[in-house]
Image (tube, rainbow, N blue to C red):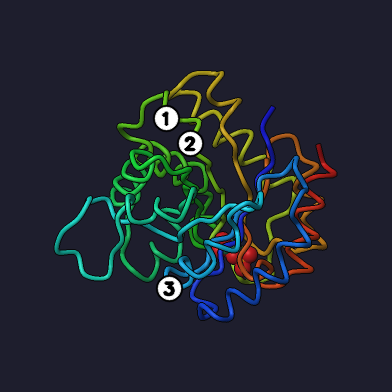
Amino acid sequence: MRKPLVAGNWKMNKTAAAAVALIKDLVPLIQGIGDVEKVVCPPFTALMAVYPLLKGTDVGLGSQNLHWEKAGAFTGEESGEMIAEYCRYAIVGHSERRQYFNESDESANKRLLAGLEAGLIVIFCIGETLAEYESDKTEEVLRRQIAVGLKGITKERLSQLVVAYEPVWAIGTGKAATKDDANGVVKNVIRPAVQELYGKKAAHSVRVLYGGSVNGKNAAEYFSQSDIDGALVGGASLKPDDFSQIVRAASKSK
Ligand code: PGA
């Protein structure tokens, strides 16, 4: 059984004060929906402020990135150990990191390894761009992202890995992938690619989320699919009603 996971990626939104206010609105709406793992990923500057509010709740805290080195002269970066002081989760390889900050499959791999090493549950993002989608390169791109991204990761660490399939053309555009397309990609490309590397059991047990314009209205469609285990949510994660609706949809689906 793969437990559904719904994670909110707040991106570069909310001051610490505004994050506290949002958490206070959100937690009562989702707390106690025990069959769904719930995670919020505020910006780094809000982690410390939000941390005490989530302590003792069943809502997890995550970072939006992490650096692979343990410490040193890496201005503007945070290590796995620093993040693990506050967080149980981290996002790596998000398409906005790849698109705007030159992150690559190789750097995503290093971040992923470091996050697992720090004991975090890492949400590893993959997905094709619009140009790749339109030229039928989805499978090739995802296979490369998985092969390079998971390099050096042992089977024992896989329980800490969550894959998020986020077609870049669906992120923040309101143009979500159809449930059948998204499920087809997870079932026919992502799980088989994991199977080639780690075997059938691993491919079956790894959790794979869909991300890209998920909201309270369309979430249930994805969660009703055979191979989608939850969602990575951007825009709608800033709206407590919408986010809680997504969590409830995930709960109902199982
Ligand atoms: P969106 O973002 O829900 O706003 O499309 C998803 C993401 O970037 O993870």
State the quadrant of the N terminus. top right
Q: CA distance from mark 2 to mark 1?
A: 6 Å
Q: Amino acid at mark 1?
A: Arg
Q: CA distance from mark 3 to mark 2?
A: 25 Å
Q: CA distance from mark 1 to mark 3?
A: 29 Å
Which residue appears farthest toward the right when viewing the image? 252
128 or 85: nearer the eye? 85
Q: Nearer the viewer, mark 3 or mark 2?
A: 3
- Residue 45's mark? 3
Q: Position of residue 17 (x, y in %)?
A: 55, 81
Tell me if the residue at label 3 has its CB under 8 Å from ligand 1: no
Tell which circle, 3 or 2, labels the residue nearer the N-terminal end. Answer: 3
Q: Is residue 178 left or right of residue 128?
A: right
The secondary structure type at the circle numbered 2 is helix
Look at the numbered discs 2 and 1 and tell me whether their residues touch, using CB distance below 8 Å: yes
Look at the numbered discs 3 and 2 and tell me whether their residues touch, using CB distance below 8 Å: no
- Residue 160's mark? 2
224 or 9: nearer the eye? 9
- The residue sitting at 45% across, 56% down in the picture is 86
- The residue sitting at 45% across, 42% down in the picture is 140
Q: Amino acid at mark 2?
A: Gln
Q: Looking at the image, in which quadrant does ligand 1 appear?
A: bottom right
Q: Is residue 5 left or right of residue 15?
A: right
Q: Residues within 10 Å of mark 1 (few under 14, many from 20)?
A: few
The residue tagged 1 is: 157
Q: Nearer the viewer, mark 1 or mark 3?
A: 3
Q: Amino acid at mark 3?
A: Thr
